[in-house]
Image: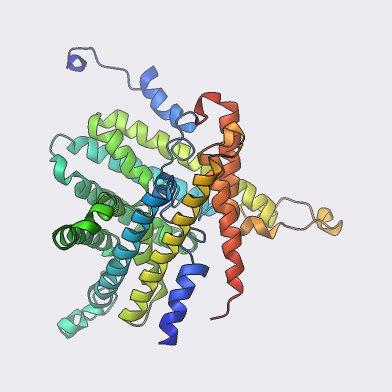
Amino acid sequence: MSAETKEREPLFSQKNLKLVTKPLNLNNPITVQVLGICSALAVTAKLKPAIVMGISVMVVLAASNVVISLLRKGIPSRIRIIVQLVVIATMVILVDQVLKAFVYDISKQLSVFVGLIITNCIIMGRLEAFAMSNKPWPAFLDGIGNAAGYSLILIIVAFFRELFGSGTLFGLQVIPQSFYELGYKNNGLMILPPMALITLGVIIWVQRYKNRELIEK
Amino acid sequence: MQELFNIFIKSIFIDNMVFAYFLGMCSYIAVSKTVKTSVGLGMAVVFVMGITVPVNYLINEYILKPGALSWLGAQFKDVDLSFLSFIIFIAVIASMVQLVEMIVEKFSPALYASLGIFLPLIAVNCAILGGSLFMQERDYQTVWQATSFGLGSGLGWFLAIVGIAAIREKIRYSNVPPALRGLGITFILTGLMGIAFMSFLGIKL
């Protein structure tokens, strides 16, 4: 390979930066790659759990990307799925125990969805597509970038749902009391699960409208 | 008996895996282009959930739960292995899927031909692991309750994927705004189906 003869790439070269920025929009894991929707929506009724979930996914994805990337030459391809699952499950257990120890109430709200990070397709997908064929540092950046793209969508959905559903952001009231006195009501529908799907559908609509090349034929 | 039936109905309609908890969305979106393939995947999910949830229930009850190991002797009664549950559950699911695949291949080649390609996909379907984790959280009393919960959730998932596949087959002939085509409209449709399913919330069981 020519990569070894080439001089060392700087840590934040153009190519590496792209790994972080591209998943934020044009290659977003949720809206474009269609990965990791499973756990994405259930935690978006309020902003706080959405952010905690985003951070947890980021830690798990970056860490398991690095581990798999370090091990990539030693894993026989026939049993790679099991190896990947074990690495992911270990990371998720660590994150779960940390959440239980430090932010117990949020960990109760997230309930089974922390455990479901294991089967979150975004993690398996990135391990298969990227970490198995790349060096640890790009794999780390790829993990951070994809998890950031994932969190971004989570936060946008949670922002709208909490704002219109409860009139609050991070639990603080943002819609002034005078609005309520004039007859404004919180839209209870936004709290219900189906509205998360519809909000995401609208986000995809807006994104594809802006980036025409993403439109499906 | 009636209680088992209640759990069954509740997990199909009210606590539907897709519409209430968004589980298994990845394969739900990816495999729902035609009714035929979605029926295959749906059946495989019902099958695997009906097996893994009771198996994981027994493991949770006799190995993982705080105090579950007391059948080994008095000195084990304080052991709490519940932090291992994620890794054990996923290992059980992955190996069960392998086992089911081998058994089906051996004894019913016809069923294997229709389910076969979907079985490996299922190991990483969130609905399956979700079923086991919900089973643990809700603390079912007997293994039969866990079984009826597993089968019911699988069936709910089956209904959802077949429903969306049927709608997607028809919507191909409609004039959807270009930017909404494909993924966008599927999410919105799922949301609308979810709202329709919420009408079951009124059922008192």
- Identify which residue, A81 or B197, lies in the foreground: B197
Q: Number of labelled discs?
A: 0
Residue B97: percent from left, percent from top: 23, 58
- Identify which residue, B80 or A32, lies in the foreground: A32
- In which quadrant of the rendered image does the N terminus of chain B lie? bottom left
Q: Residue lying furthest right in this view?
A: A182
Is residue B119 visible in this depiction of the protein? no
Residue B204: percent from left, percent from top: 57, 80
Asked if residue A9 is positioned above or below residue B153 in the image, the reply reads above
Q: Residue at x 56, y 58 (%)?
A: B194
Residue A73: percent from left, percent from top: 14, 34
Q: Quadrant of residue B104?
A: bottom left
Is residue A36 visible in this depiction of the protein? yes
Q: Residue at x 51, y 24 (%)?
A: A213
Q: Is residue B201 left or right of residue A150?
A: right
Asked if residue A214 is positioned above or below residue A181 in the image, the reply reads above
Q: Is residue A165 left or right of residue A214?
A: right
